[in-house]
Image: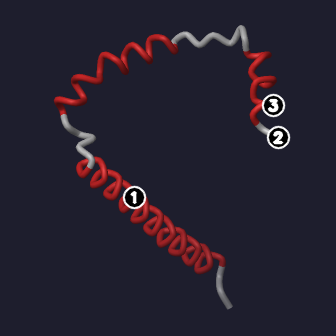
Amino acid sequence: MDTLATRFDQVLAQRRVERLHASLLAALILVLAALAGFYTHLFDLKRLAEGAPAIATLAGDMMPPDFSNAANWSSRWSTHWP
C-alpha cells in the first residue's frame, strides 16, 4: 500500500516529466522560429534600422489609445460577420 509520501513523490516526478516535455517543445518552437527568421532575413540589422522609425511612429500613434468611438466598433463588425 502506498503511503502519502510515496504518492506525493510519484506525482512530483510525473509533473517534472511533464514540465520537461513542455520546455523541450517550447525550445523547439523557438529554434524553428529563429531559423525561419534567419532564413527570411528578418534579423538583418540594416533592414531593421530602416524600419525602426516607421515602427516608432506607428507605436506613437497608438498611444494613448482612443476609445471614444468604441460604441461604433461592434456595428462595423456586424456588417462583416454573419
Amino acid beneath label 1: Ile
Alpha carbon separation for disc pair 2 and 1: 35 Å
Judged by depth in the image, the label closer to the viewer, 3 or 1, is 3
Residue at horizontal 39 percent and vertical 13 percent from the top: 57
Disc 3 target residue: 78
Q: Quadrant of residue 7?
A: bottom right
The residue identified by callout 1 is 29
For this view, does 57 lie left or right of residue 45?
A: right
Q: Secondary structure at mark 2?
A: loop
Could you say where residue 23 lies in the image, as x and y percent from the top left?
Answer: 42, 61
Element assignment for label 1: helix
Residue 36 horizontal/vertical position (percent): 31, 53
Badge 2 is on which residue?
82
Q: Could you tell me the amino acid type at mark 2?
A: Pro
Residue 10, labelled with which disc?
none
Residue, x 35% and y 52% (percent of image)? 33
Q: Residue furthest left?
A: 46
**Nearer to me, 76 or 62:** 76
Q: Is residue 41 above or below residue 35?
A: above
Q: Amino acid at mark 3?
A: Ser
What residue appears at the point 27 percent right and 55 percent down from the top-left corner? 35
- Left or right: residue 58 versus residue 75 is left
